Image (spheres, rainbow, N blue to C red):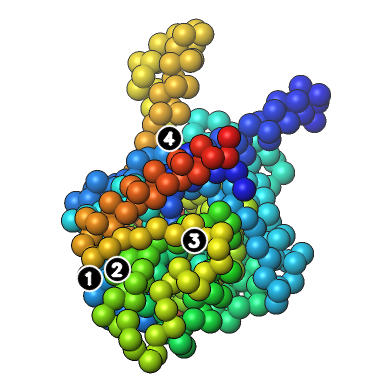
Amino acid sequence: MKLTKTFDKALWVFHLNSGSCNACDIEIVAAITPRYDAERFGIKLVGSPRHADVLLFTGPVTKKMKERVLRVYEQTPDPKVVMVVGNCGSTTGVFYDSYAVEGPIDTLLPDDAHILYVNGCPTRPENIINGVKEAWLYLEKLRGDDK
Amino acid sequence: MNLERLLVTLIFVIIIPFLGIFLGLLYKGFDRKITAMMQSRIGPPWRQPFRDIRKLFMKETIIPEGAVPWVFNGAPLIALAASLIALLYLPLGPFEPVMEGFGDLILILYLLAIPAVAMAMGGLASGSPYATVGSQRELVLMMSYELPLAIAAVTIAWRFETFSLGTIASTPVWNLVGPVGALGLVFIAVALFTVLPGELSRVPFDQAEAETELAGGLFVEYSGRNLGVFYLAEAVKLVVVGTLMIALFFPHNLSSWVSFGGPEIYGFVILELMADIAFFLLKLLVIIFIAVSVVRVALARFQIDKASYFYWVPMTLLGLLGTVLVVMDGAII
C-alpha cells in the first residue's frame, strides 16, 4: 500500500477500550476538547473502525476483549496504525498478574502491525498529541523504507 | 437546439461537476474552520476536506460479507451523480441554468431526494444493524423535511406562475409582493432555512449518522473509496441547497451597482460578471454560515421523533401561514 504525505494530515481515529480503567479514555477525550484541539492537525474521532486510520487501544486486553480487539483490527482498512495509550496496553501495568488479563496488545496483534506506544498512567493529553507527532515521524520512516 | 448551444452546454456540463466538487469541499473547509473559531479552537486548515478526500481514495475499500455488493457500491455513485445533476439545473450566480428549459423546480426537488434515498439504500444493503437503523432514520427525516421544502417551492412558483428556475431567479421575489406578502415570505424563508441542516444531515438533524449512538449510522460499513464518494456527494449537496436557497429568495445581483449604468462595453461586462460571481460566492458563504455552522455550534442532536415533529408541525404550519399571507397579498393587489 502506497503511503503519501496526505495520509499524515488526515488521521481518523477509532478508540477502543480493551479493558482499561477509564482514566486514559478520559484523557483521550480531553485531547479533542477546545483546550488541546487535536482537530487542528486533521485528527477526527470516528465511530466505526471502517473509517479509521489509527486504532487507539487503551488498557490491557482482558480475556473477553481479545476476540473483539482482533476483530476490530481486521475490520480496519489498510493502511493502518495502532496506537497504544497508557502503560497497561504496552506492559499490562498494575494488572500484570490478573487472572482476567490476556496480555499486552502487541503480543496479540499480527506481526506486521505498526504499533506505537504512548506511556503514562494515565497519560496526559499533551503526551497523546506528542504521540501523534511520533506517528508522523514513524510514517515518514515507513515512506523512506518504501523507496 | 442549434449546434453552438449544444457545444456550450456540453462544455458547461463537463466543467460544472468539477466546479461543484471544488466549491463543496472549499465551503466544507470554511464551515469546519468557522465552527472551530466559534468554539474558540484553532481548527483544521480550510483545505482539510481535500486532504480527507485524497486519503480516503488511497485507503483500502472493504465490502462486508453480509452486503449486497452492487447496491453497496452503486449507492455512493448515485448520490454523487444526483447531486451533480441538480447543479446543472440551478442558476449559478449571474448565469442561467445550463439545462434551462429541460427541467424546473420540481425536478430539483426530486433530485434533492435521490441522494438521501441512495444513502438509505446503501445503508440497508450493507447488512449491519447500525446501518439499518440509520437508514430508517434517514427515510423518516426525509419524509419530514420534504413537506416544508415543497410548501416553500410551491409558494414561490405560485407567485411567479412558473416552475422555471431561470425565470424565478431573474427577479427577486420580494419585488413582487407588498408588505403582507413580504412577511409571509420571511416565514417561508425561515422554514426553508431549517430544512437545510436536515437536507445535509448536519447537527441537530444528523440522527441518521449519529456517531455517538449509531457508530456512524448509514456509513458504518463504508470505507475507502465508497466513503470518499459519499463525502463528495455531501459536499456537492452543500452547494446545491445553498444555491437553491439563493435562487428562490436572494437572486440579487450587483451588476447594476458596479457599472453605474455605464455603457455596454467589453470591460464593464467583465467587471459586472466578476462582481456578480464574487457576490454569489459571498451569499453562499453567508447562507452556509447561518444555516449550517451557527446551528451546528448552538444546538445538540434532537431525538428522531422530535426532529420529525419539528418539521411536520411547527415548520409546516409556519410555511402554510407564509403561503396564506402571500396569497392574501396577491388578492389585495
Please, what is the three-letter code of the amino acid marked with disc 1? Cys
Q: Is residue B132 left or right of residue A119?
A: right
Amino acid on which the number 4 mark rests in the picture: Phe
Q: Are marks 2 and 1 in contact (CB under 8 Å)?
A: yes
Q: Are marks 4 and 2 on the same chain?
A: no
Label 1: chain letter: A
Q: Marks 3/4: CA distance?
A: 36 Å
Q: Quadrant of residue B258?
A: top left
> Of tags 4 and 2, which is closer to the observer?
2
Amino acid type at image mark 2: Gly
Indicate which label's residue lies in the foreground, 3 or 1: 1
Chain letter of disc 4 in the image: B
* Side of A57 where B119 appears, left or right: right
Q: Residues within 10 Å of mark 3 (few under 14, many from 20)?
A: many
Q: Position of residue A57 (x, y in %)?
A: 40, 69
Q: Which residue is mark 2?
A: A86
Q: Decide: marks 3, 4 in contact (CB < 8 A)?
A: no
Q: Earlier in the sequence, mark 2 or mark 1?
A: 2
Residue labelled with disc 4 = B280
Label 2 to label 1, Cα distance in Å?
A: 6 Å
Secondary structure type for disc 4: helix
Q: CA distance from mark 3 to mark 1?
A: 25 Å
Question: In what element is the residue under mark 3?
Answer: loop
- Residue A52's tag is 3
From the viewer's perspective, tell me whether residue A129 is left or right of residue A51.
Answer: left
Q: Are marks 4 and 2 in contact (CB under 8 Å)?
A: no
